[in-house]
Image (cartoon, coloured by chain):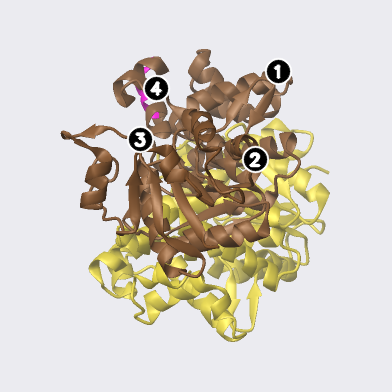
Chain colours: A brown, B yellow
Amino acid sequence: MKEKVCVVGSGNWGSAIGKIVSENVLRYPEVFEPQVRQWVFEEDFRGEKLTTIINRERENPKYLPGIQFPSNLVAVPDLVQASRDASLLVFVLPHQFVRGVCEQMKAHIAPHARAISLIKGLEIEPDKVTLFSEEIARKLGIRVSALSGANIADEVAQEKFCETTIGSQDEADGRLFHKLFHTHYFKVNVIRDYVGVELCGALKNVVAVGAGISDGLGYGSNTKAAIIRLGLMEMRKFGQTFFGTVQDSTFFESCGVADLITTCSGGRNRKVAEAFVKTRQPIDVLEKELLNGQKLQGTLTAQEVYQFLSARKMTDEFPLFTTVYRIIYENAPVESIVREVN
Amino acid sequence: MKEKVCVVGSGNWGSAIGKIVSENVLRYPEVFEPQVRQWVFEEDFRGEKLTTIINRERENPKYLPGIQFPSNLVAVPDLVQASRDASLLVFVLPHQFVRGVCEQMKAHIAPHARAISLIKGLEIEPDKVTLFSEEIARKLGIRVSALSGANIADEVAQEKFCETTIGSQDEADGRLFHKLFHTHYFKVNVIRDYVGVELCGALKNVVAVGAGISDGLGYGSNTKAAIIRLGLMEMRKFGQTFFGTVQDSTFFESCGVADLITTCSGGRNRKVAEAFVKTRQPIDVLEKELLNGQKLQGTLTAQEVYQFLSARKMTDEFPLFTTVYRIIYENAPVESIVREVN
């Protein structure tokens, strides 16, 4: 029985990943069925259906213009049809759609299916942290791995070299997903600590807000490097305090230190935080101006983390996370970004 | 018996450190003598002796213009006079002067003296690696700690927040040096692994050459983050292969990941390597043009590391270090910076 792959999602990152996965199934014909189905949320684009354009032009002109897809990647607008009998599910869509999508596909996927989550973010409520890999596992009753790394989608699509990290509890799943994702320009390391992989992908954005505040203040590269390092240490502490299984070594992986470096160099979280310091406008005004009203991930996560830590009276033990929250939401002086972490 | 501090060296970094040390001795009058002597290599500057200017203006106009020194820092041109009865020696001078300086001061320092090395670099010969802390320890017969971190001298002198790492085998020495160096803008972490601290300070420059090659090729931030991460892992492997005492945790310190980030963002090693790719001129020509003929630390260290690894038939186990060497000195294609690390 060969593996039938379904990519669930087709944004910028989903398109870049659809390309890689479709290339790789052809490299291992003994393991994978040659066709990869990609569920595309149907929309009109320049007077046509997006899936029609993708399947004719072999390109997603809305989310990844200029990048050619292999011909074995097929865009499917119907979720049930896209996921029917699929044995490998690649989740790469905005987190708010995860539950609905799982409900719809549950009765149709292969009974032995496994999944991997490339979903950014976590659900942090005052009383608990929910990982999307675990949410998918619960909803579908299958094993779920996670993938995260220093992977700006456009650069991956252009085949510029990078690394990524897959966290897989199950060794055989890890080997299979290595085959599905690894290429000469997208180097996969497989580790066991899927919790750490997902935590890094969410918490890094809080650190990037801190780095942006430092940039806005003109503090220079020593200070920024210190904030990145202190942030990495709080990410590790958060993982190890609230999830017993999180490993030190995860933070040396691409999902840890490398993704943090990338996110703190470019990236919207860093940029909007820099503008926050320079313009002194509230964050929701900047979101409207700079992000068309989309919510910034890092500030949202900072707020959720703060509420989670507050509920445990542990805000003092995470001074960088806490200070980022207080600067953004409680009018704390921006200079406290360095004063409070001493 | 209070500690008598002597700062041995007065360049850009030595001047920034002289300022910090002089501020701190006054904060702990029960531990330190109030006067800090700084050995200044005497030279003429604008028709006067440099030490005369420093002691009159409380500023080093040649190496750290615009920064005021505390009045308890005294510039002394004579090494014997500067180090006489000194019990705490801060070595912050170019490594080629270490041996001569130790010979000259040996008979004059306090019998119970201890030192700390802020010297950049290592001496790597095909048959051995010599740490300057150990070299000073051998020459003077005293215990020597090491300090290194993401510490661009000008930013430290301007009191912009950063962190640094002190490696001290002896706990009491560590506490004492913490007192001597820690301020609200220069945050000191003390660890035991002085070998790791010094190795990081030298090997980071090889990684920065790799990062500069990537920048020269226009590879973007995923690739650069991957090179930084792979470099950090080779630094760790080098330390743990050739020095049994080097700890994983050292690479999470300021001397590790933070200094590497700073060095790979700005810094001359990164910059000259970028120019190497863009102009395709040999490195010695670029050194003449861009550095007034001064030798680039990163390429020199890459060469020494390569010869050291060659002598052990271990170049394949350090693909990034080896590829940097081959690109700079053996005309390997610049693109191999990513091809060879897969």
Q: Secondary structure at mark 1?
A: loop
User: Cα distance, mark 3 to mark 1?
Assistant: 38 Å
Subunit bearing disc 1: A
The magenta segment: A274-281
Label 2 belongs to which residue? A141
User: Cα distance, mark 2 to mark 3?
Assistant: 24 Å
In this view of the protein, can residue A49 be seen by the observer?
A: yes
Q: Are marks 3 and 1 in contact (CB under 8 Å)?
A: no
User: Cα distance, mark 3 to mark 4?
Assistant: 34 Å
Q: Which mark is residue A276?
A: 4
Amino acid under disc 1: Ala
Q: Which mark is residue A41?
A: 3
User: Cα distance, mark 4 to mark 2?
Assistant: 43 Å
Q: Secondary structure at mark 3?
A: loop
* Front label number (1 vs 4): 1
Subunit bearing disc 4: A
Subunit bearing disc 3: A
Q: Secondary structure at mark 4?
A: helix
Amino acid under disc 4: Phe
Q: Which mark is residue A311?
A: 1
Q: Residues within 10 Å of mark 2 (few under 14, many from 20)?
A: some
Counting residues from the start of the chain, the first of labels 4 and 2 encountered is: 2
Q: Is A130 within the magenta?
A: no
